[in-house]
Image: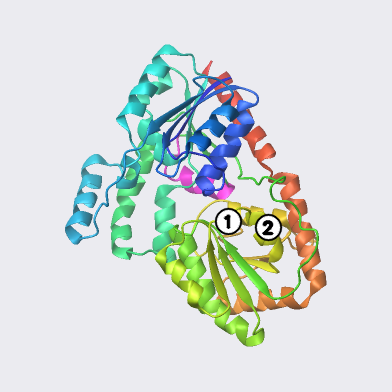
């Protein structure tokens, strides 16, 4: 197949966050079997080495088209600035965050490329890339939106869970986001989500569009199963630490869970591991028994050192990469409903692949069970690795993605 992929966020190195991780691994799988051209933007942190490595992966001159992303000035936080952005959303129908990713030079190149080349499938790797797809592209090829996560349902979940930083603003934006999502979905011939639950939600908005499920995965070679149980009372929480869902979960874990846990286990420690810690996360490093590492060279090595991985996410849709990575590494997971969404971690008759807990007291009890029961840690660890190996490698996700694109090509012809 001749595939054109659009990913405004530069998908390398594959440790930047969930969006880039998924894009990189699907790209890696597809370019081994098909002719893939990637259009992307170079961010401020993108190095020449990153560009060279991604170009080598694609394996051919012209397969990687990189455009500079203009430096984004501070949008401003005054009431007038916010009102202007909301007004622009009302007028254009497109959220400010999505419009911020649009670069005219890349748009012009896409128009010319599709006019001059045969393309079997065009994929948008994340819904923010929809801004580059013109409705008339469907006359030339099948267009596919790998949505990652519904913008409307994600914002609604923020409001309903109480995690929103600005509940009034987010509540007011909901009807606009629903209208926006319905409009952009209609441009595509098919959509992709990561879980059956996400598909059900998106079907309420885009009922006329075919919607496929392609799960997230984990790199089983990078996230190896730990050689031994470290014991002790060490917790870990992972993720990109500038994402609101992770900021909220990190603070909840540090401020609502750790004090009670340290009453039982005075030597209990928590490592908050992930790139770009926001100030609200960085300040947690001053709490007793806590460290905030920032970005690290090997997430797997930090997971291997931890007794338990706690993921108390209170908002967010889809299968979480952080959950799959911890399970692959063999670090027992205590997770919320959001953290374990889409994963059959407690099938009847099987050892649990993770323990479920929502409130602070429930988390403390679940962590205590794992701290005090080496056998349960071992069972959970092995069950988690087995679950991931059976259904959640990037190889399996890549095959599923390829199958969807191949069927789309056949249908288009």
**Front-most of residues 278 and 86:** 278
Question: Which SS class for mark 1?
Answer: loop
Query: Quick one: quadrant of the C terminus?
Result: top right
- Which residues are drawn in magenta? 195-208
| Residue projecting furthest to the right | 375
From the image, tell me which residue sits under label 1.
296
Kindly indicate whether the residue at mark 1 contacts the one at mark 2 (C-beta within 8 angstroms). yes
Disc 1 crowd rating (10 Å Cα; few below 14, some 14-19, many 20+) is few
Residue 191 appears in view: no
Residue displayed at 44% across by 58% down: 242
What percent of the width, then of the height, locates residue 70? 31, 39
Query: Quick one: quadrant of the N terminus?
Result: top right
Residue displayed at 60% across by 45% down: 216
From the image, tell me which residue sits under label 2.
301
Residue displayed at 40% across by 50% down: 152
Question: Which SS class for mark 2?
Answer: helix
| Residue projecting furthest to the bottom | 263
Mark identifier at residue 47: none
| Residue projecting furthest to the front | 48
């Amino acid at each position: 197949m001749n595939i054109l992929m659009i990913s405004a966020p530069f998908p390398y190195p594959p440790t930047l966050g969930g969006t880039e991780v998924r894009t990189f691994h699907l790209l890696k799988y597809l370019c081994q079997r098909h002719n893939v051209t990637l259009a992307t933007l170079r961010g401020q942190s993108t190095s020449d080495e990153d560009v060279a490595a991604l170009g080598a992966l694609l394996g051919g001159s012209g397969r990687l088209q990189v455009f500079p992303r203009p430096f984004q000035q501070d949008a401003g936080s005054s009431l007038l600035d916010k009102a202007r952005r909301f007004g622009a959303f009302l007028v254009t129908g497109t959220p400010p965050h999505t419009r911020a990713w649009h670069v005219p030079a890349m748009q012009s190149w896409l128009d010319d490329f599709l006019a001059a080349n045969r393309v079997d499938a065009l994929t948008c790797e994340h819904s923010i890339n929809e801004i580059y797809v013109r409705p008339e592209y469907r006359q030339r090829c099948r267009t596919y939106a790998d949505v990652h996560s519904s913008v409307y349902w994600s914002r609604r979940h923020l409001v309903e869970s109480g995690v929103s930083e600005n509940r009034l603003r987010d509540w007011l934006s909901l009807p606009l986001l629903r209208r926006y999502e319905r409009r952009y979905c209609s441009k595509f011939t098919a959509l992709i989500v990561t879980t059956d639950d996400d598909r059900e939600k998106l079907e309420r908005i885009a009922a006329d569009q075919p919607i496929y499920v392609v799960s997230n995965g984990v790199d089983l070679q990078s996230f190896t199963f730990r050689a031994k149980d470290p014991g002790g009372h060490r917790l870990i929480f992972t993720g990109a630490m500038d994402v609101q869902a992770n900021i909220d979960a990190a603070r909840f874990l540090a401020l609502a869970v750790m004090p009670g846990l340290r009453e039982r286990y005075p030597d209990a420690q928590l490592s908050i591991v992930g790139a770009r810690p926001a100030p609200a996360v960085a300040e947690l490093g001053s709490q007793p028994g806590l460290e905030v590492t920032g970005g690290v060279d090997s997430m797997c090595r930090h997971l291997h050192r931890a007794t338990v991985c706690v993921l108390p996410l209170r908002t967010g849709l889809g299968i979480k990469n952080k959950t799959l990575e911890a399970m692959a590494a063999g670090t027992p997971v205590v997770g919320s409903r959001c953290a374990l969404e889409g994963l059959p971690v407690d099938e009847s008759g099987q050892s649990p692949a993770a323990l479920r807990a929502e409130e602070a007291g429930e988390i403390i009890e679940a962590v205590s069970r794992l701290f005090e029961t080496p056998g349960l840690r071992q069972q959970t660890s092995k069950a988690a690795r087995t679950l991931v190996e059976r259904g959640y490698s990037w190889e399996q996700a890549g095959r599923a993605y390829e199958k969807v694109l191949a069927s789309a090509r056949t249908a288009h012809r």
